[in-house]
Image (cartoon, rainbow, N blue to C red):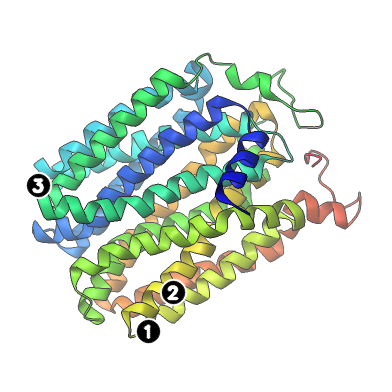
Amino acid sequence: MSSPSVIRRAFARIPDKNVWTIYTAILLLGVAYGVSIAVLAIHLKANGIPEIAMGGLAAAFALGIVSLSIPSGWVVQRFGAKKTLLVALAGYAACVSAFPFLTTTTGLSVARFFDGAFSVAIWVAAETALLSRSHATNKAFVMSLYAMSLGLGYVFGPLLAIGVVAIAGTSGSFIAAGVLALIAAIVILARLDGGRSAEAAHGEPGEHHDDGGAGTPALRVLWKIKTACLATFSYGYFQASVVLYLPLFLIQSKGVPKERTILITAFFALGMLLSTTLVSRLGDRYGHLLVMRALGAIGGTMVASFVLLSSFAAMCVAVFVAGATLAAISPVSLALQGVVVARRDLGRANALYNAAYAAGMLIGPPVSSVLFTKLGGGEMLLHLAAIWATFVAITLVFANDDPKRAARRGPAAAKPDAVAE
């Protein structure tokens, strides 16, 4: 099937221009992330920041996400997605642009904290708007394109970073990221409909509306989405750790030139980009949790096997497969929670979901930094593989959290408040 045909079908399935506006802004944000993340470890190392301190900076970023994830759900509900996105994108642009001008660990930690705080506000606002504007049979597709928008950014970002570093050094990459985030804010300002209830009019028959009355208690919402939260916790733990320590592992243990490590992020994102639509279709058809379990098993195996690889080409293949599996879990897990919670609870669910992601980012780097420093990069990677093995095991215990699985087992196994798909 030709690319124009695929694009036409995508527009036919998603006619709302606001959804595509969000995709455009998220693509620009993804490029900004890719440009900055690709050079982060190299920049910190060049400025004399030790590995242990790098773990602390990652923890500061995650702490910003944890601190603002729950309030972000309330902010989106109170002020709407557009205003939230505008303020958060501008805030992120300021933080990332200031990063190369900061020389102390304290200053860098403050910048990373607010980087995380503004980032989570962007994610909660975008995900809530997209899930609210989609319906039960379309959520995985809508969220897969959201993930692809970020994925494209992570592919193009490192490639752009190579050129920017050659011209303006690693500091220039952070400035470029800030400019891209500002452009994303301009796109939102010019093209996205405003209004706090703009998404509420986009429901579809057969969905779990329940828009009237008080929202579901937070603990009940969390229990509904526990497996989705576990998936994003595992991914946050994994992602925050490998971004910092995989490049250093390649340089120190595998003899890979530091310039080539920039390509690792691109291969990881390319794997996600090429697999996410197929994975989402499989999730819609066979069950989101079943697909997440398979992806976790394959991706975790790739992470473990990475320790044994010696050629850079083989490493790139392993990173590509890890991206095609582990990074592709995100849109499927978002789709899962989108069909098991009421529309009125989406903001709260997305806030809890991103809090779980941040918790993984908060815990992962400090633990990984100790393992990397005391035992070595190989042992650090093996413990990340163990995290994914634990995720797979727990999803077996709670297999009925997926409405499709419960439906196949009959009415007695189905959750009374599950969404009909």
What residue is shown at x 10% (from left), y 48% (from top)? 168
Quote the CA–CA distance across marks 2 and 1.
9 Å
Q: Nearer the viewer, residue 72 or 292?
A: 292
Figure quadrant of the N terminus: bottom right
Relative side of 271 to 257, left or right: right
Q: CA distance from mark 1 to mark 3?
A: 36 Å
Q: Nearer the viewer, residue 25 or 211?
A: 25
- Residue 61 visible in the displayed image: yes
Can the viewer see residue 327 in this picture? no
* Mark 1 surroundings: few (<14), some (14-19) or many (≥20) residues within 10 A: few
Residue on which disc 1 sits: 309
Q: Secondary structure at mark 3?
A: loop
User: What's under tag 2, amino acid-wise?
Assistant: Ala
At x 38%, y 44%, the residue is: 30
The residue that label 2 is drawn on is: 318
User: What is the number of the mark on residue 104?
Assistant: 3
Contact check, label 2 and label 1, Cβ < 8 Å = yes
The alpha-carbon separation of the residues under discs 3 and 2 comes to 36 Å
Could you say where residue 205 lies in the image, as x and y percent from the top left?
80, 28
The residue positioned 66% from the left and 47% from the top of the image is 336
Judge by depth and name the residue closer to the eye, 147 or 356: 147
| Residue 232 sits above or below residue 50 on the image | above
